[in-house]
Amino acid sequence: MTDLPIDKVIPEILSTLQRETTCVLQAEPGAGKTTRVPLALLTSEYLQDQRIIMLEPRRIAARGAAEFMAQQLNETCGETVGYRMRQDSKIGPKTRIEVVTEGVFLRMLHEDPSLEGVGLVIFDEFHERNMDSDVALALVLQSRELFRDQHVLRLLVMSATLDTEPLAQFLNCPVISSEGRSFPVEVVFHDVVIPRKSLLDAMFTKIKYALEQHAGSVLVFLPGQSEITQLQQRLQERFAGDDSLIIAPLYGQLPMENQRHAIKPAPVSQRKVVLATNIAESSITIEGVDIVIDSGWSKVSRYDANNGMSRLHYQRISQASAVQRSGRAGRVAAGVCYRMWTAQQQHQLHPYDVPELLQADLTTVAIRLLAWGCQTLDELEWLDKPKASAFSNALQVLQSLDAIDHQQLTPHGELITEIPTHPRLAHMLLRGAQWGVAFQAAQLVALLEERDPLRQACVDIDKRVQWLNHGGYQAKRMNSRVQQLLKLVKNQSKKSELSSAVLLAQAFPERIAQLRSLSTGEYKLANGRGVALDHQDDLFGQKYLLVADVGGAAGRSTDTIFLAAALDEEEFKQHLAGVVVTHEVAQWNDRLGRFEAERRQCWGELVISKTPMRDVGAELVVNALLAHIENKGLDILPWNEQTIHWLARAKFVERYALDPEWPQWDDQSLMESLSDWLGPFIGHVKNLDALKKIDLKNILQARLNWNQQQMLEDFAPCQLKVPTGRHVSIDYCGEQPVLAVRMQEMFGCPISPTVANGKVKVLLHLLSPAQRPLAVTSDLASFWQNAYQDVKKDMKGRYPKHYWPDDPQLAAPTQVTKAKMQKT
């Protein structure tokens, strides 16, 4: 057996787990931890006859690890070493090491929380931080605390590139480290920054270069399946007729046989170019690869709680992921890794990947926790605690599926937990069984669990159902899943009395789509999101669709429909009428300048039908007009000069009186309290003319009680009596109240007048006999003593008929000329 770096630390692993209940193993890519460690631990004294369960994040890795370990024992899978995954298991009565996918392990915990007969659980490739592995760790920790007093359950967490210090602190356990790969890898960075739109061109060029410069096989890391498909087509065209080169895709949704083809050694005299997603980062070894070309990008699905949909985000890989990828070139020989980013960009990468648990849909997590007996996240210990808001949104989804009531599982919810699929799909399957169409529902579940086999052809899911009934190997495998699902429900009728759309609406009620524009193929989902359908698709132009699969890049306002079913309008009304809500909607028609009301039948944000309303209550009228004002702003109200000046007085009192009971009069406060002060007075307003006739000043004044109205008159009088006895209006619209009066009328007044109970001086605008400004002052005494004399010299010649005394403080005020003064 070939020596591997992990062999040096296996004695330390054995002794540590003999005295400790938990251990973290950090072993870099190529160390051999996945296949050497479980076999070495099999004879540990503490295990006795108990089993080892090792979790793997991917099916191909689980099966590959189990088969390799069985070969080391000269056995076949299912004897000492076996594996379990959905729809495929090889476990026998003598199996001591079970390699299981993380989802299957969570099912095992659900069926037996104590994990009776299990002595050690190994979390392999924990650095990937999959949601299922994080949940499994939290549940296992509680399981060990609650159920394993006598036979302690040991944990071994194995990782290649994880930051082990926080993990070790969380688990309160030692860390064992192993050396890295057996062979050196030369890392070559790109010379210049590559825009993402030019990435495939650059990758194509680099692959050709690598094939010319090196003799081995090439592993190419790409963001996702679409990029793999595009590059595969270009390479096949470029190397058409070259029998020495095999172009092999590798991604999670690829059939298992195709995945096996990608990872097995190339035949003699041939070599491979394997185009892979991050599925090839961990656990599996692709024989013959000594060249890695890394795009540096990945596609990550992030859940958007606002619309209940997951969206694909392109993002740079982490430094840890880059190490994983480059390590693939040094598994069996010295290699080279070409990184399609610069050395400077390398320093800008995040150290580690964000855990999936912090950015994914938590509906499955939530129902698992409720089935476990936890109603809140705080009841478990988390390495990274999920967001409370995401958990709350997941509970709302479960509520809509009738799975929970007051955070307790309903009988229907308990049935959902027994079906190993997403709660939405389990709910659809159970509803289908109730309606006698379980077979039809099971087919839809099987199709939605797999990545669409006919994605490039059309979006109609019924075409997939036809394919499922007459397809080849992949269809056969999916039909096996259909039979597995049917065993879980009582009614296995093969009737197809319902459309696919009605069944799918049970799982995705918020994805009923209504045609918004025939010219563009745009639809609106019930959750408000915009989606689009290609003009060439068979479903184009349908009034209603049920969208089963939709997606798009982050930041785009309209998503693309990938999978859908036509929804007949009559069938819609017949089978989904119970969730259609009737709303009475009143709104202001801005174009016609009048109020309109209608009764709408709605599903979410979709309007299914609407009819005009004749007799409309005042409340609807008021709410519609208030909403219109909130949208357009206060300026659409009939503000006349009198109202504007009254409001200025009210604001003046607010500013200077400092009365805590005094209302606020700024625009924001008026808008926020619109329904309180305006609502009671506009129930009769049904058109623009009526709105223009409301007495806005009196409406505003009604905000003040009797005492406050008196305070307004005392504190901010609308007029002041000047020395001639005339009452002159005060303007409060500026920073300081203004009194505009002819200078002659202020003779004999020694000081400036005041308002606000003497607290604020009035700013005097002293006018000429022709009502033009001569001076502005708030200190009248100083003006009389100083500036007046200059004004008098200038005005005496200009207005000789008017009175310009030498001492204005002692002169009599007047509104008339000198001649009229003499007559009196």
Image: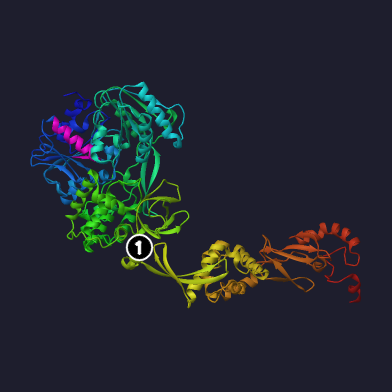
In the rendered image, residue 46, in percent from the top left (x then y), is placed at: 11, 37
Q: Which residues are magenta?
A: 54-71
Q: Nearest the camera: 354 or 761?
A: 354
In the rendered image, residue 578, in percent from the top left (x then y), is placed at: 32, 68
In the rendered image, residue 505, in percent from the top left (x then y), is placed at: 32, 59
- Check residue 77 for magenta coloring: no
Name above or below for residue 225 compared with residue 585. Answer: above
Helix, strand or loop for the magenta stretch, by majority: helix
Inspect the image, locate mark 1, and give the three-letter code of the amino acid beneath it: Asp
Residue sticking out furthest to the bottom: 615
> In terms of secondary structure, where does tag 1 sit?
loop
- Is residue 378 among what the camera can see? no
Identify the residue at horizontal 23%, vertical 48% (top origin).
Answer: 478
Name above or below for residue 430 compared with residue 286. Answer: below
Residue corresponding to mark 1: 568
Callout 1 environment at 10 Å: few (<14), some (14 to 19), or many (20+)? some
Identify the residue at horizontal 32%, vertical 37% (top origin).
Answer: 278
- Quadrant where the N terminus sits is top left
- Quadrant where the C terminus sits is bottom right
- Is residue 262 among what the camera can see? yes
- Check residue 61 for magenta coloring: yes
Name the quadrant containing residue 785: bottom right
In the rendered image, residue 371, in percent from the top left (x then y), is placed at: 22, 55
Q: Is residue 646 left or right of residue 270?
A: right
Q: Is residue 198 left or right of residue 763?
A: left
Name above or below for residue 567 compared with residue 311. Answer: below
Q: Which colouring convention does the figure follow? A: rainbow
